[in-house]
Amino acid sequence: MSKYVAYPEYKNSGVEWLGEVPEHWQVTRVKHVAELTPRKPAMDRNLECSFIPMEKLKTDSVILDETRIIDSVYDGYTYFSDGDILMAKVTPCFENKNIAISTRLKNKVGFGSSEIYVIRAGKKVNNRFLFYRLQEDGFMDLAIGAMTGAGGLKRVPSETVSNYSYASPEHVEQQKIANFLDHETAKIDTLIEKQQQLIKLLKEKRQAVISHAVTKGLPSPTGQSVPMRDSGVEWLGEVPEHWEVRAISKLSQKITNGYVGPTRDILVPDGVPYVQATHIKKGKVNFDDAYFVRRSWSYAHKKSILVKGDVLIVQTGAGTGDIGLVTESEEGFNCHALIIVQPKKDVITGDYLSMVFQSQYGYSVLYSIRTGGMHPHLNCGEVQFVKIPVPPKEEQNQITEYIAQQICKFDTLVERQLAAIELMQERRTALISAAVTGKIDVRDWVVPDSPNNP
């Protein structure tokens, strides 16, 4: 913020959390300048309008790709117009600052979840200034602290929003601040988008490296091409001539699944770690000390006690088909609703098998045998018939070592991009906070390279 100057004079706002504000700014409340959750408009019930599900309200973005006829859903929804500020009222959406200004509504009317606050700016406040003001950390901290509700779903009370006190200048200066933030945050958002695109490309390249290595082998040190043959398996294509193609049932000494049933009566504060689908990510088991079962219960269900080298497949839910490799750290754990494939160690390693399942071929074949539509599910009986390419053991070790090295490189690059994004997001937040609370004076700011800024 060093390149921006402060206002020449400040005064005590009289509000504890606001502190000092520019001398000419006035303290007000949201309810004095804006209407919270306006009345449902009178309209033709056969009107086709924009419909916005909760998940399509993001920070500074409303995705308008759905429309619905008012008649069938008139009651029980939140209605809004062009220019209204939409703000999620429930966690975690509120904490993620899911707030945006509605624009380009079909027939100038939109409606969506009742878990969205609609804030309609009056004549005394610029809607974009208020939009930025409600992203400021001081308001966020106050609102999060006032949330009510049990469990994971908590809501910001409407009184907290409507009674929130803040300071602001006259309308013209609010517009200047909003213009400044529009321009500066757009630059930051563009940089963030470029970083996100780079992360996407890195992940695609990571996936391609795994897929090529486990289906075509490693590049020859001499540059000579390896003789290939048709695998006889759809989606797999050609494989090195000296590789086998075998079904999982022929490569494993056990294919089973973890306990499937209610967990409310089996979980205890301490005991045998109990791995669930949420712990399976990016080929690893990331146990978080959240779930345990009694040792006696685990022994009674010993078919699902994990052994080093076991390959775990998420059996049901949103992560169906995700893969995790059991390491020495997880040996002896038990698991819930996961398919366990225990490889024959003299034929195939768990490391290599897990990589095959993480390849594009492995993902595709597991996806093809899922059942359940909206609630996907994998059955052990289907997984056992999946055919995979199997090189000699020595070559398997070479492949997994090569993949591990490449994954480390890609993951390091991705982490760097994520760190850069975090810094840019912090700068974005700090810039908004400084501008809307009067820490910096942008009254003389003009768009760079504009006629007013030669």
Image (spheres, helix red, strand yellow):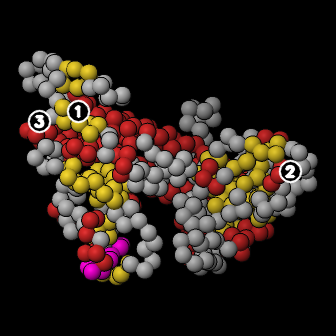
Query: Quarter of the image holding residue 249?
Result: top left
Q: Which is more N-terminal, label 2 or label 1?
A: 2
Q: Is residue 197 visible?
A: yes
Q: Which residue does the numbered mark 3 point to in the structure image?
A: 392
Label 1 – label 2 distance at C-alpha: 58 Å
Mark 1 nearby-residue class (10 Å; few <14, some 14–19, many ≥20): some
Q: Is residue 393 magenta?
A: no
Residue 392, position as x, y percentages in the image: 11, 36
**What span is in magenta?**
290-296
Q: Which is more N-terminal, label 3 or label 1?
A: 1
* Residue type beneath disc 3: Pro
261 relative to 227, above or below: below
Residue depicted at 79% across the width and 68% down the height: 32
Q: Label 1's element?
A: strand
- Quadrant containing the C terminus in the rendered view: top right
Q: Label 2's element?
A: helix
Q: Which residue does the numbered mark 1 point to in the structure image?
A: 245
Q: Which is more N-terminal, label 3 or label 2?
A: 2
Query: Quarter of the image holding residue 272?
Result: bottom left
Q: Which residue does the numbered mark 2 point to in the structure image?
A: 71
* Residue type beneath disc 1: Val
Q: Label 3's element?
A: loop
